Amino acid sequence: MEVLDRFKAVGLADIGKANFMNRVDTKFPLRSEVLWNNILPEITNDYYIVQINGLRYLEYRTVYFDTPQNLFYTWHHNGKLDRYKVRKRMYVDTGVAYLEVKHKTNKGKTKKKRIETQSSLDVILPEEYAFLEQHIPCNPIDLSPVIENHFHRITLVKKDLTERCTIDCELGFQDDNCGHETDHFAIVELKHEAGAPHSPLHKTLYKYGVRQSGFSKYCMGRVLNGQNNLKTNLFRMKIRMLQKRLDNAL
């Protein structure tokens, strides 16, 4: 992780213009060694790294919620263009947590709404229902926790503030029955306005053969943990294709 020290650090207050709430997200799964040995060393002069309380490699915990009919999961699996995720996320190093709704619109944009929460990650309080009622197309009283994940994140910001990037490493999943760790690969996610030109990071990823691939941590976690009564054929095919691509990487 020595390469992280080569980036110039900024705080959260310095990156407001790059903290897009209406954005285009592009994900690039890749092998961890390619990230650390090839990608990051080539972009240290083009990006700032976000540092919080002296830390540049921050731990996250997230609990996802769904209906008894697995509405959000099924919409994603079936390719519905207008879909939602509901989650509670804790920034472990600061102890701050949020209840969040992510909405992927039929225009391909991602909109995120959130409120700070003081309750347990696996509980939605009655006083939080009003927030959810404004942003999801179902009754929040029907939601219950279905899977938790954890990972460490690096956040980079292009120096002209036109792109933000998150890099998730050491991803793991837990539910009531089992856990699944995936420490051999990382997920780079670029967040930018629609129509933005290719960035130095985007070009570097392509240089090393890393290609865009849709990847939902929520859906993949549920498939990898073998949860019952889920339609999984499309996601299992995607997991096999992803594994083949990672095996054939540098």
Image: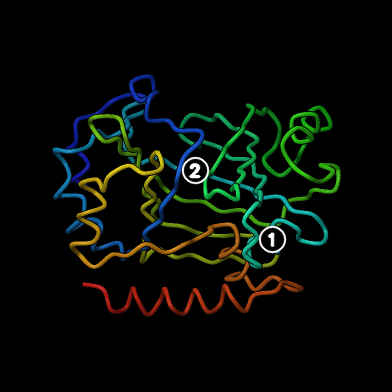
Q: Residue 49 carries which label?
A: none
Q: Which label sits in the foreground, 1 or 2?
A: 1
Q: In which quarter of the image is residue 155?
A: top left
Q: Residue 60 carries which label?
A: 2
User: Which residue is depicted at the point 69% across and 70% down?
Assistant: 227
User: Which residue is depicted at the point 52% across and 79% down?
Assistant: 237
- Badge 2: how crowded within 10 Å, few (<14), some, or many (20+)? many
Query: Which scheme is used to colour this image of the protein?
Result: rainbow
Asked whether disc 1 touches disc 2, contact meaning CB atoms under 8 Å apart, the reply is no
Comparing 114 with 119, the one in front is 114
Name which residue type carries label 2. Answer: Tyr
- Badge 1: how crowded within 10 Å, few (<14), some, or many (20+)? some
User: Which part of the image, by quadrant, shows the C terminus?
Assistant: bottom left
Q: Quadrant of residue 184?
A: bottom left
Left or right: 189 in relation to 100? left
Position of residue 119 relative to residue 104, above or below, is above
Q: Which residue is the site of mark 1?
A: 75
**Horizontal and vertical percent position of residue 49:** 27, 35
**Horizontal and vertical percent position of residue 37:** 18, 58
Whole-number angstrom distance, CA of label 1 to CA of label 2: 25 Å
Task: State which tag comes first along the sequence, 1 or 2.
Answer: 2
User: Which residue is depicted at the point 55% across and 48% down?
Assistant: 107
Disc 1 element = helix
**Horizontal and vertical percent position of residue 109:** 52, 45
Name which residue type carries label 1. Answer: Trp
Left or right: 184 in relation to 91? left
**Horizontal and vertical percent position of residue 84:** 66, 49
Q: How many numbered marks appear?
A: 2
